[in-house]
Amino acid sequence: MPLKSVRGQMLSFKDDPFLKPASECYDHYQDGLIVIRDGKIIDAGDYSIVAPRYPQLNDIDTYSDALIMPGLIDCHTHYVQSPMLGSFGDTLLNWLNRYTYPTESMFRDKGVADEVARMFFRQLLEHGTTTANVFATTFETSVEAFFEESERYNTRMISGKVLQDRNLPDSLKDESTEGSILLSERLLNKWHRRGRQLYAIIPRFAPTSTPEQLRLAGELYRSNMDKGVYVHTHLDEAQSEIDWVRQLYPSHPNYTEVYGHFGLLGRRSIMAHCCIVQEDEWETLHRCGCGVAHCPSSNLFLGDGEFKYWEAKEKSRPIRFGIGTDVGAGTNFSVPRQLSEAYKVAMLHSHNLDALRSFYLATRGGAETLCLGDTIGSLAPGYEADIAVIDLKPSEYAEWRMRFSDDIFEKLFVIMTLGLDNINLATYVAGRKVYDRMRDRKFMYA
Ligand code: GUN
Ligand code: ZN
């Protein structure tokens, strides 16, 4: 197998800066080198140390004024909502009825699903995102289109059919509860661990599933747990949603326990939002080892509430969390732009999030959240070679502004705060360059 390599300033995380001293958590090289064979990193570190080990190395992509990082990780999003991003003026439950359900109803048509999947992947790769945890919708077509496109790029993605058998329009509702589980099982058997694809069992949220559907989803999870299958859902996003759950499930002590009762909480259970969480719910999430996706642009857009990372990272019962764009309530596809919103959300509560912690969340922290911390999210031997190349001079102003900052984390904080849309120069998936901003034909596929 021929060797491939990427050279330039490089940053990668090796531990959690919410729990450990910052200096123990990252590696930064002014002139770094990553050596790749067969889609995996076989060596990474300082160029002057790594390069002499590979005298035969001749395929080297070199970047200056840039920062080579692990591919970014989006812990919660909906590809099927790509056509409705920026839909005006409503709170969660109205927004779902007015915009979301009609949009998702279109995905019964495979042609629609294919077109949207193509656009979604281009958006992710353009923004340096190489792994995402993604809702499809009710229909088999929506799952097939997603995984087919992911397989074409060879991206490591998590997705699955959405389970929803009540409280939504007939055009989107599962026709039968048992049928919805059988279809999930069929798609799981087809796609889970086919190449880099991973399957999630996805009850949309407790209000749109009957207790019977949640029970059967829990059974399906339990019987596939040892294969590394996921559960993905929404939790504690907005007060109106929480009140509705209390009405629908009056015998359960809280929203989290509804999922717990049906066996849906485990290490690969990923909960989106968690804005309004009681202490006993954090304790349950910690005990079960669930991951959480912080989706700040979405929470601000819908006026839901705010994820409180300092609650999540309470030292006695820390929770793994990463960043979610939550398109289409989220307002863009960019993980770094979520970081700038996360900073502001924290500041509203007299906390902050520096660039070190922020970019940890966008890379290794996301991977840990998704239980993929030994597979993706770091630039180190044995990891899959998913890479983003961040432009440190993405605009005339940014280039000028950088003259006043030396430290790499100061520069990254400027980059995330400016919120520019073109900060990613190139994206590599399993060692192959799939996006290059400097080329006329930017994407590997049309
Ligand atoms: N809760 C249930 N469904 C959704 C959705 O599609 N988006 C968001 N933000 N919250 C939800
Ligand atoms: Zn969502």
Image (tube, grey):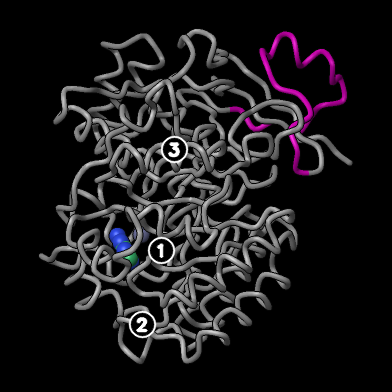
Residue picked out by circle 1: 78
Q: Give left or right: position of 302 versus 436.
A: left
**How far apart are labels 1 and 3 at the CA level?**
18 Å
Label 2 lies in ligand 1 vicinity (Cβ under 8 Å): no
- For residue 442, say whether it is visible: no
Amino acid on which the number 2 mark rests in the picture: Arg
| Number of numbered tags placed on the structure image | 3
Q: Give left or right: position of 393 versus 352.
A: right
Against 131, residue 164 (above or below) is below
Identify the residue at image location x=50%, y=69%: 118
Whether residue 40 is in magenta: the answer is yes
How crowded is the residue under tag 3: few (<14 C-alpha within 10 Å), some, or many (20+)?
many
Tell me where residue 385 appears, x and y as whole percent: 68, 38
Identify the residue at image location x=44%, y=42%: 284
Do the numbered discs 1 and 3 sit on residues whose CB atoms are within 8 Å?
A: no
Label 1 lies in ligand 2 vicinity (Cβ under 8 Å): yes
Q: Earlier in the sequence, mark 2 or mark 3?
A: 2
Query: Mark 3 falls on what kind of element?
Result: strand
Which residue is nearer to you in this view: 65 or 440? 65
Identify the residue at image location x=60%, y=51%: 434
In this picture, which residue range is highlighted in magenta?
A: 39-62
Residue picked out by circle 2: 166
Residue picked out by circle 3: 321
Query: Mark 1 falls on what kind of element?
Result: strand
